[in-house]
Structure formats: C-alpha cells, structure tokens
Image (cartoon, coloured by chain):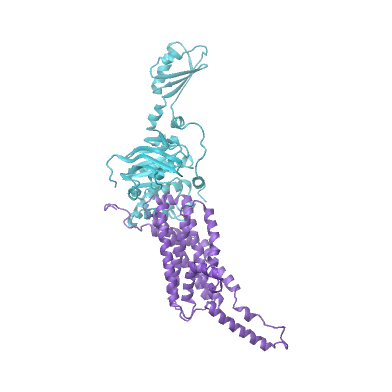
Amino acid sequence: MTETGTGDALVVNELTRIFNKHLVAVDHVSFRVKEGEIFGFLGPNGAGKTTTINMLITVLRPTDGGATVCGYDIAKKPSEVRNCIGVVPQEYTADEDLTGWENILLCADLYGIPRDASVKRAEELLELVELTKFKDKQVATYSGGMRRRLELACGLINRPHLFFLDEPTLGLDVQTRAATWNYIKLLKKEYGMTIFLTTHYLEEADMLCDRVAIIDHGKIVIIGTPEALKEGLGGDIMTVSLKDGNVDISDIIKRVPRVKEVKKQDSTYRVKVEDGEETAPAVLDAIRAEGHKVTRLSLTKPTLDEVYLEYTGKSMREEEESKEAAFRQRVTMRRARGGGR
Amino acid sequence: MTSNRQNSRNPLHGLWALTNRELKKWYKNPYLLILSIIQPLIWMGLFGRSMNITEIFTKTPITIPQLNPPLTLTQQIQLGRALSNATTQVFLQTFGTSDYFSFMAVGIVSFVTLFTTMFSGMSIVWDRRLGFLNKALSTPVARGAILMSKVFNAVIRSIIQAAIVLGFAFALGLQVGADFTPLNLLGVFAAVFLIGMGLSSIFIAIAIRSTRIETQMAVMNLLNLPLLFTSNALMPTSVMPDWLQLVAKINPITYATDAARQLILYTPMDMQQLVIDFAFLGAFAAIFSTVGILLSWRYLSR
C-alpha cells in the first residue's frame, strides 16, 4: 500500500510549531519510527505531544521543518499521508446520535472507500472489537470501553500503514484499559501496522512499546527502548540491612563486581547495581564471607516512571492547555466513565 | 493522484456522508424535528393571524361624533364597506395582495431559512470542540466538502421546513395569485436553496476559526432580527423610510421573499423582477459559497 523503502514509517526532521509568533510548542524535533514498531511518545501535559501528532496527521501546519509519513511529505502530499494513516484521537469523536454502524460507515466514506468494500471491512472490524451485537445501537448508549473500541475500528477502516493513537486509554478503568490494549495488540497482529501512541500510563508504555521518546518543553529529551532507558538510570537498587549497625561494610560491597554505588544509612545500605538478579547473590555472599548477618534484602528494578521523572523533573505542571483542549478532555473523561451525555 | 491509489477517486467523496450525518441528527430525533417545524408555524399562525391589518376597518364600527345628524346604522355599515374596499385597494398596491396573512406566510419561508442556516456556524464550532473536526481533517476528505456538508444540511432542512410552512399556509387559507401553478413551488424552493446556501456560507465563514459557542450565539442574536426587519419579510419595503429601503435593497432576504411572493401571490407575476431576484440570489449564493470554500482551505487546518 505504501511506496516507502527506507524501513522507516515515519521520519521527523526538525519539526517546529510556533503559536502566535512566540509560543514554541514543538522545537526542532527529529526522530524516526521504524516499520512495524510500537513507538511511545511520552511527556507531561503541554509538552508538545498533541501538537506534534496534529502536525503529523496533517491537521496542523508546521512552522518549520517537516516530516515524511509512509514516504510522503506532510506538507507537500497531505492527501497521500491521510490515505495511509489511521487516527484515533484522544476525544471520542464518534457521533453520539448515530449508531456504531453508521459511524464506521461514515468514516469509510470520508476515505472514499467504495460501499461494497467498506461494508465488508466494517463488519470484520466490528467483529474484531466485539461490537457486532451493538452495532445498531446509538453510540450515546455505549460504555467508555465500547466507544474506545469503536474509535479503534473507525481508525482502521482504511487499513492504515501507520496508526496514531492519542491517549487511547484515557479515563478508562483498569479492566477496560487492559482489554483495550489486548484489542490494540490483536489489531496490530491482524493488520501488521506501525503504531505511534501517546499515553500517560508509563507501565503501559513499558509493556507495549518497542521504543519510547520523552518530549518536554517542545524538545525530545531522550529516546530509546524502555530497557535501555531504565538501564541508563544506572541499574537496579538493592537495599541491604545488617543486624549490627556499628560496623561499616561499604567497602566490602563496593569490591563486588558490577556494584556502582553504595550509600549507608544507619544499618541499611542502598546499593546501585547492574544486573540486579545476578549481582545481588554475589553481594550477599561477600557480606556473609566477612561474618556479617543480613536481616533484610530487597531488589527494585527501576520503572519507566523513574526514567520519566529523571528527565522531566518532579515539579507539577501548570496546565498550559487551551480552554478548548481542557473542554475536550472533560468531555472525553465524562464519556469514558458514564457513557451518557 | 496516483493511478494505483485505491481510495478517494471522487473529489466529492464524503460530502453526502457528512451531510447525511447532520440530517440524521434531525430526522432521527422526532422531538427536534417537531420543534423545528412548530416554531415557524407558531410565528405564522399567531403573528400572521394577530397582525391581520386588513380586518381592522371591517371589524370596527365607524361613528363620526361631529356629524349631525349622526350616521344611521345602514350608513355606518356602508361607510365601513367603503373604507374596507379602499383598504383592499391600498393593500393590493403596497403588499401586492389584499390579505396580510398571505403576505406574511410567504415571508415566513425566508424567516425559517434564516433561522435554520444560522445554526450551521454553531455546528462547525461544536465539531471543533468535540474533536470531530480534527478527525475529519485527518482523513482525505476534501476540506471544502466538510464546509459544504454543513451548507447542504442547512439548505435541505430549510427547503423541507419551507414546504411544511407553505402546506400549512395553504390549509389556513393562503390566497394565491391568478398566475399560480403548483410548479411555481419549485421556483420557491430554488429561491430557498440559493438564499440558504449564501446565508449558511456566511455564518460558517464567521465561525470557521472560532472555538467558542458563546461567540456564535452572540453573532446569531446580533444578526437575526435586524436581518429580518431590514427585509420585506414582514412589511413591504415601500412603506419604509428611505435609508431603510436602501438597506433592504442589499439584503438578500428581500430578494428571496420577493421571488417567493411573485411566484405564489402576485397577480400579475412581474417576470422582470423575478429574473432580477434570481440573478441577485444566484450571485449571492455563488460568491459566498466560494468565499466559504476558499476560507476552508486556508483556515480549517490551523
């Protein structure tokens, strides 16, 4: 379906958007998304995530720089770009007054898919997201999870090559979130797309994404596989408590290979180690060999949360979003929870 | 663009789907449908009937106290009739019909169109706020189709409402002109089509970058009654002061209303004026829908 031969579904080059001549929302951002990978785009509110997505899906014009989606330039060939992408926006965009079936056919018509083909695809997609039973019900009666599934199905009606998911699980409860991810994984398996997603739930990003980028203040601060990013923090944290608080065994621990840092607090030692699972027993052996008794030991692997906080800082963000965006988010949350108006 | 592209062969694809989306909200919601039909009927029935100026003279017994001896009852009735005849003459000359209700009922057609088209601006703001607009913009549907779907939605609704209003007006005793044939109604719908197209394009153009519903409400409140009162919908322009006549002359609603009255009420139908009416309406619709489409290319994406 696409004519790209580079192995990159998306190439972003110095992409920049300045609002009202001075507010730099996205600041010379460059990255690539490989064919077939799930790419997570993370960052605090107002960091530039949605602005970036909106430029990539050709809804917003870049002030400077550009991007190639499926081999097409977003500024020069917007129509081709639109044909090869699928978009599931943060908001629930399905029309509440229409039925699920009418909504998905409307999406098909927006892509100009001939009716006989669109009916077949719509049936198949609704079956896949298990909405066939509810297809003739008004969307206003759908639950949050059902709406999200309908959005997914609508976003896939044109068999996109690159699938944009903006906060696909915003406002959903834990069960529905898990189910939604199963659908996304299923759809990816079925159609083999490249997925570009944003989320605030970092454990989701960790679990699903092949690579993540963290954006803050309009700039990419770090990019890589979740494992590499976590490794980059300097390894796992091992906590060791001794029975005897009067001795200092820091040096003993430090001598063990792959131990990077030791901090003593009373009789407890915080040890930064590489390959925690293998290093921890070695540390334990070294301490015991010197005749000390260990009363407590724990090993914590850093999560993406730590990576995220490391790079974006711990201070809370003042919402810099527009009234419009805030309104949309309220509507989305309300619909996700209640389903009704 | 390329020959092997499977989708979007037709540049107009999605136009009807988007239009139908809007229409469905209306015809699948009986409550809304009935309300939107009742409103013009209330105007026509209450306003048209209560403002029945033609009856003023016939219903009022005339006594002239200065007269000595006073008028006999027969004379009073005769005077009443004479005055009533005179009024009919005056009415025929100023209103083009002797029946104010008929005059007014046709004016309500323009009124309905104006009020229906005003909401098209609102609906684009809603789509923006709810995210549907962004979703549609990320698909290959023509930007102009997004705008024109709103226009056609308003136009189709207006025509259906106009048909219902006229149907009721006939039932309530609308007095048609001598040249009237049912075919003339097609002309009336054509006039509604053109005025609706121009008006909704204007309201959408005003709303195209707006994100606030409140602004659109204010715009609607600012424009609706002035646009109505500076036209011939409720009163003929000939009785207006000169400056107001000037405003009425450039108000497209005047031309739509006149066209409808020519086609339904007037004896004889002024063909020359009818041609002028349609030329004006055609130009109005063409210019503003073009402006709307040009703006949609530039401003729907931001």
Q: Position of residue A341 (x, y in %)?
A: 52, 51
Q: In the figure, the cyan chain has which letter?
A: A
Q: Nearer the viewer, residue B135 or B83?
A: B83
Q: Position of residue B123 (x, y in %)?
A: 48, 56
Question: Which quadrant would residue B243 be assigned to in this image?
Answer: bottom right
Q: Nearer the viewer, residue B233 or A175?
A: B233
Residue furthest to the front in view is: B242
Q: Nearer the viewer, residue A51 or A165?
A: A51
Does A336 appear above or below A240?
below
| Count of number-bearing discs | 0
Does B273 appear above or below B138?
below
Question: Which quadrant would residue A227 be assigned to in this image?
Answer: top left
Q: In the figure, the purple chain has which letter?
A: B
User: Left or right: where does residue A275 sit relative to residue B58?
Assistant: left
- The reply to whether residue B275 is visible in this rendering is yes
User: Left or right: where does residue B152 sit relative to residue B55?
Assistant: left
Q: Position of residue B188 (x, y in %)?
A: 45, 72
User: Left or right: where does residue B156 sit relative to residue B54?
Assistant: left
- The reply to whether residue B163 is visible in this rendering is no
